[in-house]
Amino acid sequence: MKGNQFSVKVYETSIEDEEVFMAFFDANYTLFKDHLISIQGELSSTIRAYLEAKPLCYMHNIKTPISRTRKELAEALESQHLETKAKQEMIEEELAKLSERLDNNLTVRDSMVRSGQEVRIEGDLLLLNRVNSGATIHTTGNLIITQVVEGDIRCYGSFMMISASPKANIIFNGLTVKNELLEDRLNRIELVNHRLVITPVLKKEINWA
C-alpha cells in the first residue's frame, strides 16, 4: 500500500449569519484559499454553492483531530510499546506451558487470515495475526486472538480471548458476543451458568486449562 502524508491548515467555524460569513471569506479569500474549512452546525445550499464557486475546500460536521505535542506522542508510543511487550511476554509464557503438555491439541498460527478465507480448527487455536473482514475462524476448542479482528468468529471451547473488535461478528457456543462489552485489551469470554461472562484479562490470569 502506498500513501502520502500532508500537513493541512484547518480553519474551523460555524455559520450564524450567511451574509457575514460570505463577506468574511470574500475579504480573506487569499488567506484561506489554501486552508481546509471545517464548518460545524447548519450548512445551507446557498453557502454550499458559495464555497464551491469560490472555490474553497471544506468539510461539514466532521470532528478534526487535535495535534499532540512531541511529549504526548512520545508517551503514547511508549505506552503502546509496553502494551505490545507485555502481550508478547504473555504469549511466550503460555506457549512455554503448552509445550510441556505432550497431549495438547493446540494449533498456533501467525499468518493473517484474509478476506474470503475460512479456518476450521479441531481443538485449541492461538492466532498471532489479524482476521480481516470477510474471513471466518471456527474452533471446537479454546481460542486466543492477539491482533485486530474484523471477520466472523465461531468458538465452541471453554473460553476465548479477544480484544475490542467493533467490526467482528463473534459467536461463542451459539451466543452472540456484543462488541460494545469488550474492552480495548484482551477479554476472556466464557459461559457461567449458561450466561456469557466477559472479563478483561491480566497477564497473570492467562491459562488454557
Image (cartoon, rainbow, N blue to C red):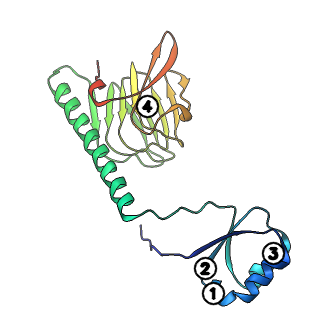
Relative side of 148 to 52, left or right: left
Amino acid beneath label 2: His
Which label sits on residue 47? 3
User: How far apart in space, not on screen, are marks 2 and 4 (Cα)?
Assistant: 49 Å
Instruction: Report helix, strand or loop for mark 3.
Output: helix
Q: Earlier in the sequence, mark 3 or mark 2?
A: 2
Relative side of 6 to 59, left or right: left
User: How far apart in space, not on screen, are marks 4 and 1 (Cα)?
Assistant: 57 Å
Whether tag 3 and tag 2 are in contact, CB under 8 A, the answer is: no
| Residue identified by numbered label 4 | 138
Q: Earlier in the sequence, mark 4 or mark 1?
A: 1
**Between tags 1 and 3, which lies in front?**
1
Residue 57 sits in which quadrant?
Answer: bottom right
Relative side of 174 to 57, left or right: left
Q: Position of residue 158 (x, y in %)?
A: 39, 18
Disc 3 packing (10 Å; few <14; some 14–19; many ≥20): some
Instruction: From this view, report whether residue 3 is shown above or below residue 105.
Output: below
Task: Name the residue located 40 percent from the left edge and 37 percent from the top edge.
Answer: 185
Q: Nearer the viewer, residue 97 or 132?
A: 97
Instruction: Report helix, strand or loop for mark 1.
Output: helix
User: How far apart in space, not on screen, are marks 2 and 1 (Cα)?
Assistant: 8 Å
Instruction: Report helix, strand or loop for mark 4.
Output: strand
Q: Position of residue 6 (x, y in %)?
A: 48, 75
Q: Earlier in the sequence, mark 1 or mark 3?
A: 1
Amino acid beneath label 1: Leu
Q: Position of residue 208 (x, y in %)?
A: 29, 22
